[in-house]
Image: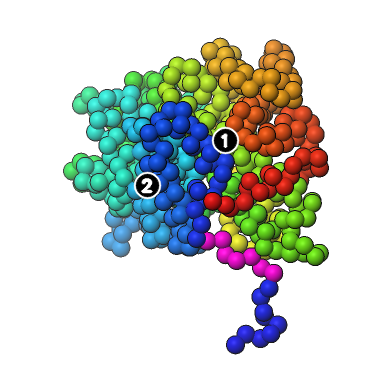
């Protein structure tokens, strides 16, 4: 029997046994809005699919898997007991269960299904809230498809494996597995984001399209995967020869390809996921796309993974918000529940606003992928890097503020918030850090006028609905017309692009109280630098109520 001094009161119940999808109003409404416009016949099927995944993500079992996968990070096994090089990564069983559920739910299968990108994006958003680290190989596998499609023969061989709903762990020839995972290797020590500085060399073999690679990859994502897309210099001079290659871990005859994993990265967060440094030394590879066109070939993969960075950060923001609202709803201080106290309500409303803006933007980008029109592709050219820049940047301060809503309870590992906080900077760094995204937007503005036209047409759909949005659009146009010092101003410009886009989407689709609060605080200047500084005259209670877990 517990001592009377250990009686537990004034603590929230565990947040388990809920539908992560069905209780998220902004997500649910966004999915149904886009489906109604593009494929209304799928509404029932997608609701059932995402609710099933949502219930799994909110279960105690999935939460336990996430905790175990992070408490027991992967281990590198370079050699077997006899001294043979094996280069294998050992994972806790929880990792395989998370991956198996993700693949089984179709989170690597977007490119061939009706409304595939929207339903897959919503699923990725939902399942990432159970655990974020395993999302890396899921994202890479999904994103490899457009790069492989530059070679119809390779696509015919590999795409069915990549989009399979079957997960099989272990290294075997790809043809012997029901489904495969892919990773990526682009960055090297001397270049980092400047992939054109890569020195990995590709020597052609007699057979058409076959090469041997020699070099070092400083950051190889998901090194336990079945195959990788990598960049290497295919010309003898090493100039103008950067080419994309497919590197399988296991060759068709069952022998292991030369893929020496030198070490796994000891990362701030993302502990469940393996990221490594690898050496190629006579590593067999198959060319993907044209020789010397590696960046153009792999750019489709990069764009898709950047969208996943947006979705992953939005998912972390939503989970942090959910935890904060749940805690304050059940915790009392100074004579009232925390959620009822005016200042805490302001903080929660501000967090809810940020979360809904990120969710709405991520779903709009996914729907644009499904549409696939020239207009939507031009829109994505600016919208994806701008969203990747802004949403991922907002993730860390938002998660930190949500953690603070739990006070000291949020600072201990058992709450799950410290893991979220460690994970939160990752998406801002991977697939090109903030400066890379900002400069990419500038390139699009300068070289692709159709991209700017598509963006302006998109935000123009909300013109006249809110004077603060209209003023922000006008200010953005003035900013874009001034080319002096544009590179040094790139972050400022891209931030405004992202905010105007989010504002336009919320004005069109969100409840009036949400759109009003966003335009006042993010576009009208009536808000502070920290969360919890919304104008007191706004309907803060409605924003918090909308963020609550509800059916």
Residue 150: percent from left, percent from top:
33, 23
**Residue denoted by label 2:** 105
Q: Is residue 225 left or right of residue 129?
A: left
Q: Main secondary structure of the magenta part?
A: loop
Indicate the quadrant where residue 464 lies.
top right
Q: Is residue 56 left or right of residue 191?
A: left
Q: Residues within 10 Å of mark 2 (few under 14, many from 20)?
A: many
At horizontal 58% and vertical 55% (from top left) the residue drawn is 419
The earlier-in-sequence mark between 1 and 2 is 2
**Does the magenta-highlighted stretch encompass residue 235?**
no
Residue 42: percent from left, percent from top:
38, 36
At horizontal 70% and vertical 37% (from top left) the residue drawn is 513
Q: Which residues are magenta?
A: 10-16
Total labels drawn: 2
Indicate the quadrant where residue 173 lies.
top left
In space, the residues marked 1 and 2 are separated at their CA atoms by 22 Å
Q: Nearer the viewer, residue 287 or 273?
A: 273
**Residue denoted by label 1:** 360
Indicate the quadrant where residue 179 lies.
top left
At horizontal 74% and vertical 61% (from top left) the residue drawn is 337
Cβ atoms under marks 1 and 2 closer than 8 Å: no
């Amino acid at each position: 029997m517990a001592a009377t001094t250990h009686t537990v009161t004034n603590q929230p119940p565990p947040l388990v046994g809920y539908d992560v999808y069905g209780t998220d109003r902004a997500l649910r409404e966004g999915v149904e809005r886009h489906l109604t416009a593009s494929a209304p016949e799928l509404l029932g099927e997608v609701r059932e699919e995402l609710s099933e995944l949502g219930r799994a993500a909110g279960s105690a079992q999935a939460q336990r898997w996430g905790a175990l996968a992070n408490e027991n990070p992967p281990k590198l096994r370079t050699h077997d007991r006899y001294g043979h090089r094996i280069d294998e990564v050992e994972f806790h069983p929880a990792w395989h269960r998370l991956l198996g559920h993700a693949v089984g739910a179709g989170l690597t299968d977007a490119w061939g299904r009706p409304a595939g990108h929207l339903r897959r994006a919503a699923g990725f958003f939902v399942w990432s809230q159970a655990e974020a680290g395993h999302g890396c190989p899921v994202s890479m596998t999904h994103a490899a498809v457009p790069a492989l499609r530059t070679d119809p023969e390779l696509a015919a061989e590999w795409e069915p494996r990549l989009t399979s709903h079957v997960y099989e762990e272990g290294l075997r020839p790809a043809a012997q597995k029901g489904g495969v995972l892919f990773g990526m290797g682009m960055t090297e020590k001397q270049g980092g984001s400047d992939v054109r500085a890569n020195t990995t060399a590709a020597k052609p073999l007699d057979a058409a399209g076959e090469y041997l690679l020699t070099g070092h990859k400083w950051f190889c994502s998901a090194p336990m995967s079945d195959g990788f897309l990598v960049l290497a210099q295919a010309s003898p001079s090493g100039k103008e020869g950067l080419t994309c290659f497919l590197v399988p871990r296991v060759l068709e005859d069952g022998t292991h390809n030369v893929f020496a994993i030198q070490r796994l990265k000891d990362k701030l967060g993302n502990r469940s996921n393996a990221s490594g440094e690898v050496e190629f030394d006579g590593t067999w590879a198959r060319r993907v796309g044209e020789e010397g066109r590696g960046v153009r070939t792999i750019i489709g993969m990069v764009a898709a993974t950047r969208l996943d960075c947006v979705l992953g950060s939005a998912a972390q923001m939503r989970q942090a918000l959910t935890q904060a609202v749940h805690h304050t709803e059940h915790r009392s201080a100074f004579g009232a529940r925390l959620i009822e106290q005016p200042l805490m309500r302001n903080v929660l409303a501000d967090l809810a606003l940020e979360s809904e803006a990120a969710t709405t933007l991520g779903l709009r980008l996914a729907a644009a992928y499904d549409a696939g029109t020239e207009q939507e592709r031009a829109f994505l050219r600016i919208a994806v890097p701008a969203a990747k820049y802004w949403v991922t940047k907002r993730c860390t301060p938002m998660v930190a503020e949500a953690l603070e809503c739990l006070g000291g309870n949020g600072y201990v590992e058992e709450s799950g918030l410290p893991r979220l906080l460690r994970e939160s900077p990752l998406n801002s760094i991977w697939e090109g850090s903030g400066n890379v995204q900002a400069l990419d937007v500038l390139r699009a503005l300068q070289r692709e006028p159709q991209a700017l036209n598509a963006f302006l047409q998109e935000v123009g759909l909300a013109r006249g609905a809110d004077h603060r949005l209209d003023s922000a659009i006008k200010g953005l146009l003035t900013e874009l017309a001034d080319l002096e010092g544009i590179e040094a101003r790139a972050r400022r410009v891209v931030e405004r692009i992202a905010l105007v886009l989010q504002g336009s989407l919320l004005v069109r689709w969100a409840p009036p109280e949400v759109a009003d609060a966003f335009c006042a605080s993010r576009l009208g200047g009536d808000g502070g630098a920290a969360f919890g500084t919304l104008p007191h005259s706004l309907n803060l209670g409605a924003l918090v109520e909308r963020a609550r877990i509800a059916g």
